[in-house]
Amino acid sequence: MTVEVLRLGHRPARDQRLTSHVALTARAFGADRVHVSGGEDSGPIETVESIVERFGGEFTAEREPSPKKLVKDWNGDVVHLTMYGLPVQDVVEEDGLTHSEADDVLVAVGSRKVHGWIYDEASYNVAVTSQPHSEVAALAVFLHMYFDGSELDLEHPGGEIEVVPSGQGKKTREPE
Amino acid sequence: MTVEVLRLGHRPARDQRLTSHVALTARAFGADRVHVSGGEDSGPIETVESIVERFGGEFTAEREPSPKKLVKDWNGDVVHLTMYGLPVQDVVEEDGLTHSEADDVLVAVGSRKVHGWIYDEASYNVAVTSQPHSEVAALAVFLHMYFDGSELDLEHPGGEIEVVPSGQGKKTREPE
């Protein structure tokens, strides 16, 4: 079972940091891979690779030149996060869109640019609130609900550094 | 009972969009106000005001020239979200840091710039995973856990437009 994320409409000049936040949120909240479609830009990919090297795990990032083909060929559910979709709390509960029940999932998030085709191609158009906010927030809360909180205990072995949770200050160690 | 958010270290040239995402996430996930500290910049404040006018509710945004004073004088809990903190799932459960049990809460999120003092002044340093990702994601998931999902049903009356949740396309209406 795999959970992957598709970032639509990345604009190199404007979306560098937001796309990096989307990618790192995907990793931290238990996805296996992020596909970045839109303008050619190795920035977010390199950010992810650097974080994986330092903090571990097997998350990968790649450019996606054919997002429509990825979606059409996806063998499982495609979840498009949009404020116009059906409430996430209903979809997760009523349609069993959870890690324990669902097939492979591709979670698509847009940028400011509109991508009309994804509304038609998605298995589900899902709203994390019907309010305008952030694709980063929508992705994080969707994955948190999809994994039912288990993603918070996820470990990322094989890195160079590990955070030691602490009530005060910053503590890190080298993994054993 | 009030829940407010403090955005630390906003840099006008670089953080415009991320700070707007922090502010709109605060609004969508049930906070009452966002304080933006750092460089002088009316951009994120105007973004929030425009969204509130169109989509309703009573959320407010303001510049905060004295974040240390705000934190020191806060009459309730100050929750600093940092990947170095204690696991959110433990803090919410063991310390009763939930909307039904807690006092007024100020949730502080940093930018890339480091703000050492907040580690000492916060009531809780809380990690939404011990991995590097995004202050937007951390804020969204913290508020979702703090409100125990009830924020997803929140209404924002008084706007000009309302989204009608839909499985296909974009539907809106004028509120009655």
Image (cartoon, coloured by chain):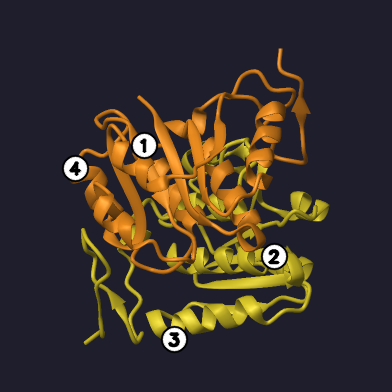
Chain colours: A yellow, B orange
Q: Chain of mark 4?
A: B
Compute the Cα span from label 1 to label 4. Answer: 15 Å
Task: Identify the residue position indicated by label 1 in the image.
Answer: B148
Question: Residue B95's mark?
Answer: 4
Mark nearest the camera among 1 and 2 is: 2
Q: Is residue B28 visible?
A: no
Q: Residues within 10 Å of mark 4 (few under 14, many from 20)?
A: few
Task: Identify the residue position indicated by label 2 in the image.
Answer: A15
Compute the Cα span from label 3 to label 1. Answer: 34 Å
Compute the Cα span from label 2 to label 4. Answer: 38 Å
Mark nearest the camera among 3 and 1 is: 3
What secondary structure is found at the residue carrying circle 4? loop
What amino acid type is highlighted by mark number 3? Glu
Q: Chain of mark 2?
A: A
The N terminus of chain B: image quadrant: top left
Task: Identify the residue position indicated by label 3 in the image.
Answer: A53
Spot occupied by residue B164 in the image (x, y as percentages of width and height): 70, 29
Q: In the drawing, does residue A82 fall left or right of residue B6? A: right
Residue drawn 34% across the image and 51% down it:
B80
